[in-house]
Image (cartoon, rainbow, N blue to C red):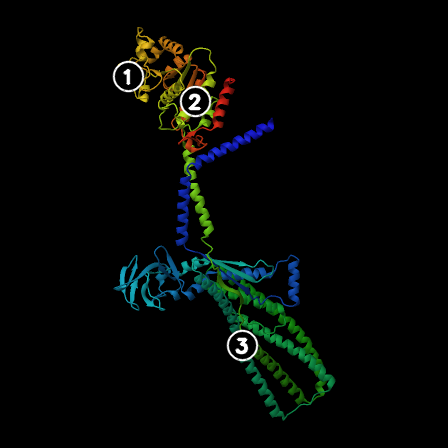
């Protein structure tokens, strides 16, 4: 049982969903029109929208500080152990340089990106590179300060009278190519280039350099490669002009490489300058040593000196060699110390200092000094960052002084040891001739100076070679390339969005219409309010029932109503069936239903009496087209007032061409309620039951007056007419109260003016052919559903 209820609930839910969908499907033309318009708008947008291309490039950074050989293996092991790698820091540092305003400023200046050219079309503009533009703008005062704060857009046109210049300030100026004239940018000149003709207006726009830098930097995305210890950097950008995008990326890479080379060259030049200055001093010392040797030989007449004994000579040579090496180091340290004392600037590197710690400190100092020089290109010396670097440089310089001092002390101590050894062995030479000792001293001094001189010459040559063969700082893996098709706008996305908008616009409008519509739409609105029997639904129709074989949708719905009334009333042993027809407010069609119900009963051969009991606003005669009877025949009002009138006298026999009798309401009385309860209306009902098969009473609306409630006890069934798309849902509380409090006898609801063409949401759009006519009626299932509801409500068994 529970499963059956669950299945039934699911079916009911599906049915409700179908009903809601059919409400919207009825307006399928709206959806079709909206979707068509939306797709057309999408097509026009794709036709004229600015297309965006993706541009990519890839480079490999050349890090000269990377470990090679065994050190590279150690670095790899350190990375596997989870330690931080210097490669990531190096790549991030270089990315900051690539994204810097300083580099982008060089790109802008190198390519004149402050000036853009656009060819004006019918709908949109197309950007051109300077080389593709038929005309070129020349700023005659490019260093003017006002160019840093002003932007200007000019339109160059070509007509029968020549070229013209237009902007928002200068308005309209005629000019000749190559002629200078004034503009908001100062004096300018327009020159022709290439063989292209100016067919469309050319729009030239100038944007200040710093603004251009910010705009171009926002286009470019720079990301490191995801591989571990990778030195690959990826570039990506989006731009409507793919040629300009490729030019921008390639120029950025080129300017970065040139900037790195300039840094290296500046270090090499500083080293050369230092070596040249030291060579001058050492050359003078060498010349002095040579002069001493020459003078000694001339004075002493010495041309050659024999070597001492092998055992003394070898010992002296070894110790003197060690002493010379340490004295060389002392000389280099003295040179470096004097360079430190001179002042600021780059320090010489790669001089052959034995202490690697001192050499490393010199490299650190030079790198930081280069960063200071780069920073001064875009900042002042008084800025906090520059002062911070100055403090760090001072600290490095102080530490370098201390390191050199400590190194000198160590070298001096070692030198003293070797000198003591030399002195000890020299004592052995006391027996040697004095001239030989003098010669050795002069020769030794000459060798020391000569070795220093040769060493500096060697370093100078190495530095010159490095300067002339400075390698590129990067390797270009992929030059800038653009996608062959635009990445935006996406055709499928635009059409999909257009389709969605085209569907949502009518859907939202209809949803709002349905949501805010407070009129009764269908039987569901009534059934949700209260459980009342539904007799049927009368369709919206301009047709009038004329003949017995009428198969119109109206006639069929009235016949269904007649059948359902029979089930509601049940089998009667005697007397006519009294059918009251009422509604909540006027205009819901109770008179329309009453007259057509009377026609259907009469067509079936029954004797029918139609009574117009709405004595406040009578409409029966108008519906039947016999309004003239109100002037020549008495009605209910006259009968209720005049006790001498008989019921037979107020009955109109077969009015017009209809096969039923009629009692109309009569004249409008000032006190209708009092007249209806004076007891004479009961006589009319009693007479009708005696002489007719059916009595149909058109009563007053119960939501406005109390008349119908006063006479409802005479009814066998009360047909409560509810007109769809007319009655406010809030007024359903009136029939709900009438039904639940039994104020109207045997009450059942009839829906009037139902539009069956709207589908299940409002009615049931089934067509049933009869002869040459197409009749819109309720389906068999709908009739059975209504009948079963009536039987269930009143526990009547059809026999």
Residue that sits furthest to the left in the current view: 161
Is there a contact, CB below 8 Å, between mark 1 and mark 3?
no
Which tag is nearer the camera, tag 2 or tag 3?
2
Q: Is residue 119 left or right of residue 16?
A: left
Q: Is residue 208 visible?
A: no
How far is disc 1 from disc 2 in space, using C-alphas?
Answer: 29 Å
Residue 590, given in percent of the width and then of the height, sits at: 37, 21
Q: Earlier in the sequence, mark 1 or mark 2?
A: 2
Q: Nearer the viewer, residue 252 or 311?
A: 252
Q: Is residue 421 left or right of residue 541?
A: right
**Which class describes the residues within 10 Å of circle 3: few (<14), some (14-19), or many (20+)?**
some
Residue that sits furthest to the right in the current view: 311
Q: Secondary structure at mark 2?
A: helix
Residue bearing the label numbered 3: 464
Residue bearing the label numbered 2: 561
Q: Is residue 287 visible?
A: yes
Residue 654, given in percent of the width and then of the height, sits at: 33, 16
Residue bearing the label numbered 1: 629
Q: Secondary structure at mark 3?
A: helix
Q: Earlier in the sequence, mark 2 or mark 3?
A: 3
Reply above or below: 495 against 222.
Answer: above
């Amino acid at each position: 049982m529970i499963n059956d209820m669950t299945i039934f609930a699911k079916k009911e839910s599906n049915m409700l969903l179908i009903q809601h969908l059919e409400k919207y499907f009825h307006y399928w033309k709206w959806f079709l029109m909206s979707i068509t318009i939306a797709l057309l708008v999408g097509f026009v947008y794709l036709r004229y929208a600015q297309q965006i291309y993706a541009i990519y490039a890839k480079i490999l950074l050349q890090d000269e500080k990377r470990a090679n050989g065994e050190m590279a293996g150690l670095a790899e092991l350190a990375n596997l152990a989870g330690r931080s790698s210097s490669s990531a820091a190096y790549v991030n540092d270089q990315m900051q340089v690539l994204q810097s305003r300083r580099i982008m400023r060089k790109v802008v200046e190198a390519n004149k990106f402050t000036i853009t050219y656009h060819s004006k079309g019918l709908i949109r503009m197309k950007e051109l590179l300077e080389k593709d533009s038929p005309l070129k703008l020349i700023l005659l005062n490019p260093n003017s300060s006002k160019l840093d704060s002003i932007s200007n857009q000019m339109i160059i046109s070509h007509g029968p009278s020549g070229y013209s210049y237009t902007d928002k300030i200068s308005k309209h100026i005629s000019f000749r190519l190559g002629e200078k004239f004034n503009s908001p940018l100062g004096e300018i000149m327009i020159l022709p280039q290439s063989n292209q003709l100016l067919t469309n207006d050319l729009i030239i726009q100038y944007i200040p350099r710093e603004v251009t830098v910010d705009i171009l930097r926002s286009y470019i995305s720079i990301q490191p490669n995801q591989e571990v210890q990778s030195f690959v950097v990826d570039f990506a950008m989006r731009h409507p002009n793919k040629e300009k995008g490729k030019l921008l990326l390639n120029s950025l890479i080129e300017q970065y490489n040139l900037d790195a080379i300039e840094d290296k060259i500046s270090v090499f030049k500083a080293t050369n300058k230092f070596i040249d200055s030291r060579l001058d001093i050492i050359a003078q010392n060498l010349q002095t040593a040579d002069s001493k040797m020459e003078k000694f030989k001339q004075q002493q007449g010495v041309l050659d000196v024999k070597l001492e004994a092998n055992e003394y000579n070898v010992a002296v040579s070894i110790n003197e060699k060690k002493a010379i090496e340490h004295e060389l180091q002392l000389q280099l340290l003295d040179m470096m110390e004097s360079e430190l004392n001179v002042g600021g600037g780059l320090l010489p590197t790669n001089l052959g200092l034995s202490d690697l710690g001192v050499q490393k400190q010199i490299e650190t100092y030079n790198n930081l000094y280069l960063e200071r020089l780069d920073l001064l290109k875009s900042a002042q010396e008084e800025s906090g960052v520059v002062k911070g670097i100055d403090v760090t440089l001072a600290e490095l310089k102080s530490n370098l002084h201390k390191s050199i001092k400590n190194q000198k002390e160590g070298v001096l101590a070692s030198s003293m040891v070797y000198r003591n050894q030399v002195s000890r062995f020299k004592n052995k030479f006391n027996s040697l001739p004095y001239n030989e000792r003098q010669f050795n001293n002069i020769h030794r001094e000459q060798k020391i100076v000569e070795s220093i001189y040769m060493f500096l010459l060697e370093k100078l040559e190495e530095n010159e070679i490095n300067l002339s063969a400075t390698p590129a700082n990067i390797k270009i893996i992929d030059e800038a390339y653009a996608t062959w098709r635009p990445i935006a706008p996406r055709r499928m996305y635009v059409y999909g969005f257009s389709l969605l908008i085209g569907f949502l616009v009518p859907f939202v409008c209809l949803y709002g219409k349905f949501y805010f519509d407070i009129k009764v739409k269908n039987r569901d609105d009534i059934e949700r309010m209260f459980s009342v029997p539904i007799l049927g639904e009368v369709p919206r129709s301009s047709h009038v029932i004329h003949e017995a074989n009428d198969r119109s949708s109206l006639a069929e719905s009235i016949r269904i109503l007649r059948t359902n009334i029979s089930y509601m009333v049940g089998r009667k042993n005697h007397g006519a069936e009294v059918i009251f027809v009422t509604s909540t407010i006027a205009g819901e069609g109770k008179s329309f239903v009453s007259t057509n119900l009377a026609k259907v009963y009469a067509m079936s051969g029954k004797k029918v009496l139609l009574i117009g009991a709405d004595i406040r606003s009578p409409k029966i005669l108008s519906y039947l087209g016999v309004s003239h009877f109100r002037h020549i025949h008495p009605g209910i009002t006259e009968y209720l007032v005049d006790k001498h009138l008989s019921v037979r006298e107020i009955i109109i026999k077969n009015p017009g061409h209809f096969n039923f009798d009629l009692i109309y309401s009569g004249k409008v009385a000032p006190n209708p309620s009092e007249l209806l309860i004076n007891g004479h209306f009961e006589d009319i009902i009693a007479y009708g039951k005696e002489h007719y098969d059916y009595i149909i009473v058109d009563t007053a609306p119960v939501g406005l007056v109390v008349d119908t409630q006063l006479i409802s006890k005479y009814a066998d069934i009360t047909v409560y007419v509810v007109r769809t798309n007319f009655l406010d849902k809030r007024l359903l509380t009136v029939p709900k109260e009438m039904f639940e409090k039994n104020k109207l006898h045997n009450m059942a609801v009839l829906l009037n003016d139902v539009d069956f063409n709207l589908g299940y949401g409002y009615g049931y759009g089934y067509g049933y052919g009869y002869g040459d006519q197409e009749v819109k009626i309720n389906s068999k299932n709908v009739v059975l559903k209504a009948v079963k509801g009536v039987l269930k409500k009143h526990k009547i068994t059809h026999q």
